[in-house]
Image (cartoon, rainbow, N blue to C red):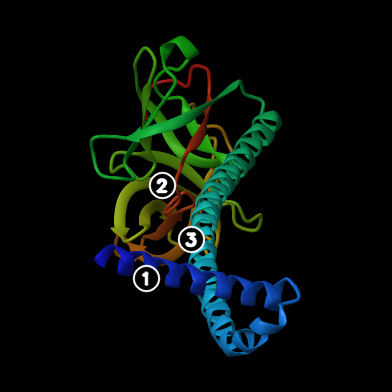
């Protein structure tokens, strides 16, 4: 008796499944349904629509999560690509700026009547910034003490101090012991003085030995005078910013802001040759 009920239960389920399949076929495959099943088809049609609606919603949710995953993967790819392109652009800009600096050095070296060699700054000296530089050339490249060192456009940087086999140390014009003869570039003046690495205030350095009646004005450009064997004439030192009396009114002292002050010096030009004894 129990076995009979079990088989009857399975036959009932199978019958229901067949009816639903016929109803589904009639709805979506446009298959004609025998007349006795029309009534059942009309009854089960709402069920099919509900199942279809639910299936569509489930499919939409699944598509949403699939698309969201694809979007996240694409976003990660494009974020990485953007970062790579920004890095490449930064490198290209740095190369462009370096080429511009090197072009300026080359142009200046072609205008002067001295043998020159270009060098890269590879470090600062052991002292505070603005006092000395370490460059990547040395004795094997023809460097020797006291040779003038300039940056682009003929700006005076300093002077070679200590020379090693493959490197050299450059004392900058902002070093307390640095001294160079200067002259006012303005044609109406041409006043002579001495530029020293003696700091007056932030960014200003002393230029003295002017006579009391020397024609000096704020904004005047100071260049090397060339009246010694240590530096050629015409290298740009800086600009006058302050003027005051010295030695009880017998002389004038000015504050010079060096043209290289506040700049990052990355490449320099060394004027080769023998430049005499230390000044």
Q: Secondary structure at mark 2?
A: strand
- Who is closer to the viewer here, 214 or 183? 183
For mark 1, give the secondary structure. Answer: helix
Which dot marks residue 69? 3
Lateral position of residue 202 relative to residue 95, left or right? left
Labels 1 & 2 near each other (Cβ < 8 A): no
Q: Is residue 174 visible?
A: yes
Residue 26, by quadrant, is bottom right
Mark 1 or mark 3, earlier in chain: 1
Quadrant where the image shows the C terminus: top left
Circles 1 and 3 in contact, beta carbons < 8 Å: no
Which residue in the structure is indicated by mark 1?
9
Q: Comparing marks 2 and 3, which lies closer to the viewer?
A: 3
Check disc 2 and report the residue beneath it: 195
User: Relative to the observer, which residue lies in front, 170 or 97?
Assistant: 97
Query: Of the residues under marks 1 and 2, which one precedes in the sequence?
Result: 1
Q: Nearer the viewer, residue 254 or 173?
A: 173
Relative to 142, is 217 above or below? below
Q: Residue at x 38, y 69 (%)?
A: 8
Which quarter of the picture shows residue 46? bottom right
Point out the frontmost of discs 1 and 3. Answer: 1
* Residue 225 in picture, x, y percent from top left: 54, 41
């Amino acid at each position: 008796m129990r076995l009979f009920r079990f088989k009857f239960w399975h036959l009932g389920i199978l019958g229901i499944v067949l009816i639903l399949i016929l109803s589904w076929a009639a709805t979506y495959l446009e298959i004609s349904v025998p007349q006795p099943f029309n009534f059942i088809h009309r009854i089960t049609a709402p069920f099919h629509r509900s199942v279809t609606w639910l299936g569509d919603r489930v499919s939409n949710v699944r598509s949403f999560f699939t698309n969201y995953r694809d979007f996240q993967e694409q976003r990660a790819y494009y974020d990485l690509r953007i970062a790579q392109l920004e890095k490449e652009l930064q490198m290209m800009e740095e190369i462009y700026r370096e080429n511009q600096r090197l072009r300026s050095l080359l142009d200046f070296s072609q205008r002067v009547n001295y043998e020159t060699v270009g060098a890269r700054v590879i470090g600062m000296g052991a002292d505070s910034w603005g006092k000395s530089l370490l460059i990547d050339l040395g004795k094997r490249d023809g460097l020797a003490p006291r040779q003038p060192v300039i940056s682009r456009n003929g700006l005076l940087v300093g002077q070679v101090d200590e020379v090693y086999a493959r490197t050299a140390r450059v004392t900058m014009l902002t070093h307390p012991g640095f001294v160079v003869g200067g002259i006012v570039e303005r044609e109406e003046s041409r006043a002579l003085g001495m530029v020293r690495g003696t700091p007056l205030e932030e960014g200003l350095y002393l230029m003295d030995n002017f006579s009391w009646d020397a024609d000096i004005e704020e904004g005047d450009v100071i260049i090397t005078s060339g009246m010694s064997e240590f530096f050629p004439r015409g290298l740009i030192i800086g600009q006058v910013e302050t003027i005051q009396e010295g030695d009880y009114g017998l002389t004038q002292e000015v504050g010079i802001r060096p043209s290289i002050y506040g700049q990052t010096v990355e490449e320099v030009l060394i004027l080769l040759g023998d430049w005499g004894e230390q000044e």
